[in-house]
Image (spheres, rainbow, N blue to C red):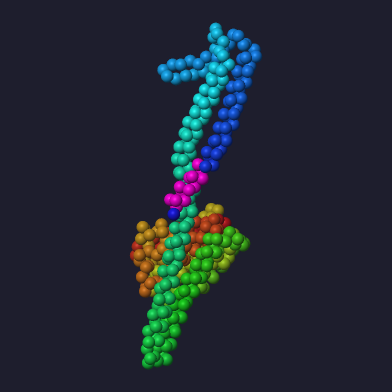
Amino acid sequence: MFKNARIKLTLWYLVIIMLVSGFFSLIVYRGFTKELGRGFHFQAMHNPYERRILIQERNGFSRILPFFIYPEELPPEEVAEIITLAKQRFALQLMIVNGIILVLAGTAGYFLAGKTLHPVEVMVDEQKRFVADASHELRTPLTSIKTETEVALRNSKLKTKDLRRLLENNLQEIDKMKYFSDSLLSLSRYEANGHNLILEEVDLKEAIHQAVERNKAQAKEKKIDIGENLSEVIVKGNPQSLVELFSILINNAIKYSKNGKKVRVKVRVRGKNTEISVSDQGIGIRQEDIPHIFDRFYRADSSRNKSKTDGYGLGLAIAKSIVDLHKGEIKVESKLGKGSKFTVILPK
């Protein structure tokens, strides 16, 4: 698709360039013919008997030598022939120049068309991948609900206890789909309309407290201690999105940590910036996975088994979008089997 679009765009470039080139060539040609006629007229009026025009032939080529002193007069019909020859030669030279322009413009236009369409191609590929990944993630809970419901309907001796268990399982799958759709909406909002977020002064200590409260139940279930070392820092940002950012990082730290481990949240000021770090003692991330963990739907191999950890690979993509909207930076350090540390750097 994009190859044909590139060729079409190149042809449009060529049409525009050659129209402009042809227009200016026509102007130059008309100017040349007028000046040529004016020159002959000037010669005839001022020096009719002393200065003439000679066509010099050498090695099969002819060239016009105007205002050349020649002892005998040239008949008018030969003068007209000389003018016609001069026009033809000049027109030929213009055609050669336009041919060179056509070749150069075609090459440059094809290259420029590729550069122009490349961002569009990348965007379309990302969109296709996004739709494919989203469809895959939605298909899993829908298939589970459909399968369990069909099995239950075929069972004529279904008991109330089994029916209740079926409904509970279906409700869990529905909650997963709701979480997934909410995550998609959040990511879409930050990527498309995030620049319309209202910024105000935010107390980072309070924002992190709210994020910890959101994840206390999960931490308690896994007996994970969340330690806080927070400085009093005020930054310019959006309160809700910053709470969501810290909640995502704390939730990931808990999710990928074993029972009884520790998660540490630290805030400190460094020059004109504020650093917020969330560190865990979890499974860690392989070095080859680190450059991709902020991509949508990306999950490292160690976390792809959903029987161990639930997730859709959207959390860190949302976190990265929030950090970008606040003109900040997010970094990660990790050692496989020992844990990870996510650091968010925000301007004060």
**143 versus 25 height, above or below:** below
Work out whether residue 70 or residue 260 is closer to the camera in this orientation and state it: 70
Q: How many labels does the image show?
A: 0
Q: Is residue 200 magenta?
A: no
**154 versus 220 height, above or below:** below
Which residue shows up at 45% across the image and 63% down it?
130
- Whole-percent x, y for residue 40 in the image: 60, 18
* Residue 266 visible from this viewpoint: no
Which residue shows up at 44% across the image and 81% down it?
170
- Outermost residue, right side: 45
Q: Is residue 333 left or right of residue 43?
A: left
- Outermost residue, top side: 71
> In the picture, which quadrant includes the C terminus?
bottom right
- Whole-percent x, y for residue 273 in the image: 53, 55
> In the picture, which quadrant includes the N terminus?
bottom left
- Whole-percent x, y for residue 194 in the image: 56, 61
Which quadrant holds residue 169? bottom left
Q: Is the magenta stretch mostly helix, strand or loop?
A: helix
Which residue shows up at 52% across the image and 28% down it?
91
- Whole-percent x, y for residue 17 in the image: 53, 39
Work out whether residue 75 or residue 93 is closer to the camera in this orientation and state it: 75
- Magenta segment: 2-14
Work out whether residue 190 or residue 159 is closer to the camera in this orientation and state it: 159
* Residue 320 visible from this viewpoint: yes
Which residue shows up at 52% across the image and 64% down it?
188
Which quadrant holds residue 144? bottom left
